[in-house]
Amino acid sequence: MISKLSARGSILVALLAVAAVGVSGCAGLKKHKTDLSYVERPVDILYATGADKLDHHQWGEAVDYFREVERQHPYSDWARRAILMTAYAHYEDGDYNEAIGDADRFISLYPGNSSAGYAYYLKAVCYFEQIIDVGRDQAATDQALIALREITRRFPHSQYASDARLKIDMVNDQLAGKEMTIGRFYQQNGDPVAAMGRFKDVIDRYQTTSHTPEALYRLVALDLSLGLARDAQRNAAVLGANFPGDRWYSDAYRLMVSKGLKPSEPPKTGRSLPEKLHIG
């Protein structure tokens, strides 16, 4: 599972930047019960109390106060900020679906607001933190990738885009790992054609991930098992050209030699990784 620590730090810093308002009265507030009973209260007191609940990690109570800000003072700047604070409280409470819903509501109501980038980012991180091990369904992984790409498209020069690009690399590695797991299963259970399809998919779609050298090696092994010597030579050459010091290339080379073959001469690309690997 991908670590949540760095994402949580980024989320909190961003929240402080986009949702900060004057809450200097917060320290002197009395403790309130979460049953607000529809009693009208000054908006700054409601908001400050919600912020105080956040500071004390009382996520559910914070949500109650920020929602009351929206109920009593709709369409105000306070209400707009309260939506983001509610989203953050749900996120910290591990209620990702509610946090995503809050973020979507903010985006729908205030698409041109300067804080919309934060809403998109929080939504993406909620998906990102739900990514699970490669042995299970990757629905959250796909959703995370879509959401992260949306950030880089809409806010390419923002702090959110910089972090999103790093997370995209991690998500792609996760998706490639899933394809490798399935490919290995097919290979071990005597279905070389299906296995080759998965390994080629890794090379075509995720060639910059850590799984590419192994995918190329397994293509070499499968080619040899099917008597496709020329394809094996070509794939081994691509592996050697792009990952000459990798253990998977060493294994591929030994495998080729054991069959009385050698890889073709590596293509003269002039760089360590071509923009597109061409696999037979």
Image (tube, rainbow, N blue to C red):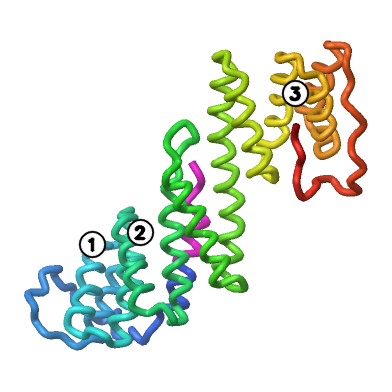
Cα distance between the residues tagged 3 and 1? 55 Å
Q: Is residue 211 left or right of residue 259?
A: left
**Whole-number angstrom distance, CA of label 2 to CA of label 1:** 10 Å
Secondary element at image label 3: helix
Q: Quadrant of residue 187?
A: top right
Residue 5, magenta (yes or no): yes
Q: How many marks?
A: 3
Measure the C-alpha gap from mark 3 to mark 2: 47 Å
The amino acid beneath tag 3 is: Val
Task: Give the residue drawn at x 64%, y 26%.
Answer: 196
Dot 2 corresponds to which residue? 92
Residue 182 left/right relative to 25: right
Q: Position of residue 186 (x, y in %)?
A: 55, 21
For mark 2, does the 10 Å Cα neighbourhood hold few (<14), some (14 to 19), or many (20 or more) residues? many
Q: Mark 3–mark 2 contact, CB under 8 Å? A: no
Q: Earlier in the sequence, mark 2 or mark 1?
A: 1
Q: Amino acid at mark 2?
A: Glu
Under circle 1, the secondary element is helix
Picture coordinates of residue 91 (x, y %)?
35, 59
Q: Magenta residues, as a range?
A: 1-11
Q: Which residue is mark 1?
A: 60
Q: Residue visible at 68% across and 31% down?
A: 215
Front residue of 78 and 114: 114
